Image: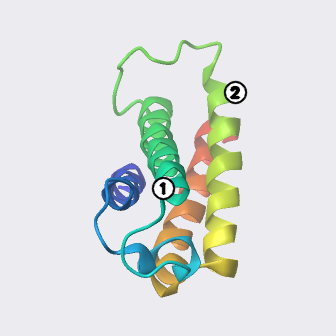
Amino acid sequence: MVAVLLAMIGVVYWVVAFGVRIGEIVWGGRHVGRLPGEQRAWSFLYGLGMFGSSIVLLELSGATDFGLLNKGWQRSAGVVVMGFLGTAGLASILKGTRWERWLFGPIALGGTALAWWLTFG
C-alpha cells in the first residue's frame, strides 16, 4: 500500500514537472501556479525518486520480481530508499505546504519505516 501511495506522490510531482499549474501544493508553496524551469526539473527527479522507491519496496517485500535488484544489492537499495524517503519526509513535514505536511511527509516516513523493516527486520 505504501508503495502505491509513494507512486501517487511521484505522479503529483511529475504532473507539476510537466507544467500543470498546481505549484502551490509542492516545494513549500513558494510558487503559485506553474513552477519555473529549475523547480520543474527537480520535481521530475523527485517523482523519479518516489517511483524508484516504490519499486524497491515492492522488490524487497517480494510482492514483485522484476529482477531489478539482485540479492547482493537489496540491502544497499533498502538503505538508499530509507535515506531518500526519510529526508523527503522530514523536509515535507518541517518546511512543506499543508499537502506536504499532512499527506506526503507521513507517507514518506511510512515508506522509511517499511524500508527499514524489509531491509533489517
> Based on the displayed image, in which of its 4 quarters is residue 86 positioned?
bottom right
Q: Is residue 31 above or below residue 68?
A: below
Residue in the foreground of this view, choosing between 109 and 24 = 24
Specify which label sits upstream in the sequence, 2 or 1.
Answer: 1
Taking 85 as reference, is 107 left or right? left
**Residue at 36% across, 78% down:** 33
Q: Secondary structure at mark 2?
A: helix
Residue carrying label 1: 37
**Residue at 49% across, 87% down:** 98
Residue 116 visible? The answer is no
In the image, which disc is placed on residue 2? none
* Amino acid marked by disc 2: Ser
Q: Is residue 75 above or below residue 37?
A: above
For mark 2, does the 10 Å Cα neighbourhood hold few (<14), some (14 to 19), or many (20 or more) residues?
Answer: few
> Based on the displayed image, in which of its 4 quarters is residue 15 positioned?
bottom left
* Amino acid marked by disc 1: Gly
Q: Is residue 46 above or below residue 100?
A: above
Q: Position of residue 104 (x, y in %)?
A: 48, 70
> Based on the displayed image, in which of its 4 quarters is residue 108 positioned?
bottom right
**Residue at 41% across, 73% down:** 23
Of the 4 image quadrants, the one containing the N terminus is bottom left
Residue carrying label 2: 76
Residue that protrudes farthest toward the front in the picture: 37
Taking 42 as reference, is 75 left or right? right
Taking 25 as reference, is 11 left or right? left
What is the CA distance from the residue labelled 2 to the residue labelled 1? Answer: 32 Å
Residue in the foreground of this view, choosing between 75 and 47 = 47
